[in-house]
Amino acid sequence: MPVILFPAGGKMKTCLSAEEMKLCDSNTMQHYGVPSCVLMERAALEFVRSLHKEKADLSRVLVVCGSGNNGGDGMAAARMLFLEHFQVDVVMIGNPQKASEEASRQMGILEKYGIPLFDKLPEGKSYTCIVDAIFGTGLSRPIEGRYAQCIRELNEMEGYKAAVDIASGVSADTGDILGCAFHADITVTMAFAKYGQLLYPGKAQTGKLIVAQIGITPESFLDLHPQGVYYEEDDLKALLPKRSEDSNKGTYGKVLSVTGSYDMAGASFLSSSAAYAAGAGLVSILSPEANRIPLQTLLPEAVLKSYEGDGTRELEEILPKATSIVCGCGLGTSEEASSLLEALLQEASAPMVLDADALNLMAEDDLLADEACGFQGQLVLTPHLGEAARLLHTDIASVQEDKIGSARKISQQFQAVCVLKDASTVCCDTEGRLFINTSGCSAMSKGGSGDVLAGTVAGLLAQGMDEWSAATCAVYLHGKAGEYMEKETGAHGLFARELVRGIREMIKETAEC
């Protein structure tokens, strides 16, 4: 599979499921002929190198190993640390009689070097660094018994904690905690990040994620077509639309913001101002007459079309000029709101973002849902967990248990890009592509943050980005804006409207790079 490129030439970062990683391992060994022991030595070498780079105190190291290849990686790393003259204790918590071929080989090497291998955690000893090499990415069942007890004891110990490939107990596919999990300060994962290291709660157990190259490259994909990607800050420059000196407001598109209801002018302001911050040339707001004065005061740059009644006549007047649409923020679920949404789905052809109440209306009305399924333009849906549960006619817990699967179901059902908002937002499209967001912070957990995101997507769509690129770029940019503003406001005091400034600042910084 060729490396996927951004329009400007930047490279996406690939993330894999456990099964995809297993196939990459196999392809590297079987197709290219790279021996398993070579990959293990490279993994151990990169792990130790990462410990040094992170300036971990390695004066007294405890390495706890399972009986699989993850344990073999840990034993190889322990030997390398021993040969660097650090004090190293190695514990084989797994069953030596059931050790994999490579783990058995590493046990034999330790024995010949005279490195003691214990079968339980030493008592009364303290360590400056604790290494988890118990379970790898293939773990699929809850950890119990002495393994669970061992992990709990390791978590209670003082010292810098590092995981080999994945923190034991974290599902590589979902980020779920399988019974219990090692709480790492850093995780050195091999070749590619795994889904579960980017999704909560696994992300919290992973600590700082370091992706180490051990000789398993995109060439090892062969007939495999990984769809999972994530972005890093350096990618923003390639993602964002370019500006030309020879341009005017029409060059950067016209966003139609069908938002707000009585006493809900704020949602309309937030989404519309975010569209401007993302670079749209003009924003027109269609909102009830009650919102006219607040919106003209808060956002005089916008063109306001206020209405009494259901607003469909006013919509007909301004819809043809729109190059993108955002609908639903603060819209309410009245009959008038339903009529507006129905008219949009039937008459619009510009790319459209449906958020908040637009999604709630679709969840309640099968006819509206059918209209959305048949929408002829590009469509982006931005549900939070509760809205996703309503769209899927299930409960929030079920969505949370399988965020990727839920996002894929919504995407396929409505033939749209689904942006499933959470602490680690997931985006899916009808082609099977997956994006897991790595930006953002707890300061963003405030009402109105979703309105800002919806407007940001619409602002990027207006500038000609396709729905996948606009959605994923907006999600990452929105999260970076939150991180930027948290430095100023702290984790508790961030207002959603300040995210708009954060978006402007991040775009400005990116342009100056």
Image: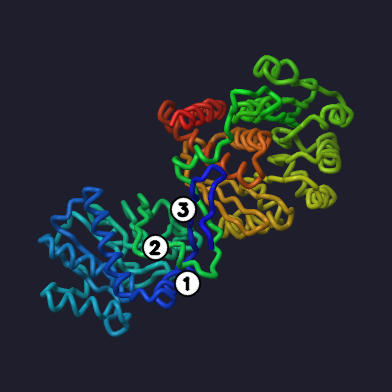
Disc number lying in front (3 or 2): 3
Residue 23, disc? 1
Q: Which residue is pictured at 45% across the width and 44% down the height?
A: 232
- Mark 1 and mark 3 lie on one chain; the one further toward the N terminus is 1
Using residue 85 as the reference point, say whether residue 167 is left or right of it: right
Q: Position of residue 503 (x, y in %)?
A: 53, 30
| Spatial separation of the CA atoms under disc 3 and disc 2 | 18 Å
Residue placed most toward the observer, 38 or 286? 38
| Spatial separation of the CA atoms under disc 1 and disc 2 | 27 Å
Q: Is residue 141 visible?
A: no
Q: Quadrant of residue 243?
A: top right
Q: Mark 2 points at which residue?
A: 180
- Mark 1 and mark 2 lie on one chain; the one further toward the N terminus is 1
Q: Is mark 3 on a helix, strand or loop?
A: helix
Instruction: Look at the image and tell me in which quarter the C terminus lies.
Output: top left
Residue 293's place in the image compared with 9, above or below, is above
Using residue 175 as the reference point, say whether residue 249 is left or right of it: right
Q: How crowded is mark 2: few (under 14 residues within 10 Å), some or many (20 or more)?
A: some
Q: How crowded is mark 3: few (under 14 residues within 10 Å), some or many (20 or more)?
A: many
Task: Indicate the amino acid at tag 1.
Answer: Leu
| Spatial separation of the CA atoms under disc 1 and disc 3 | 20 Å
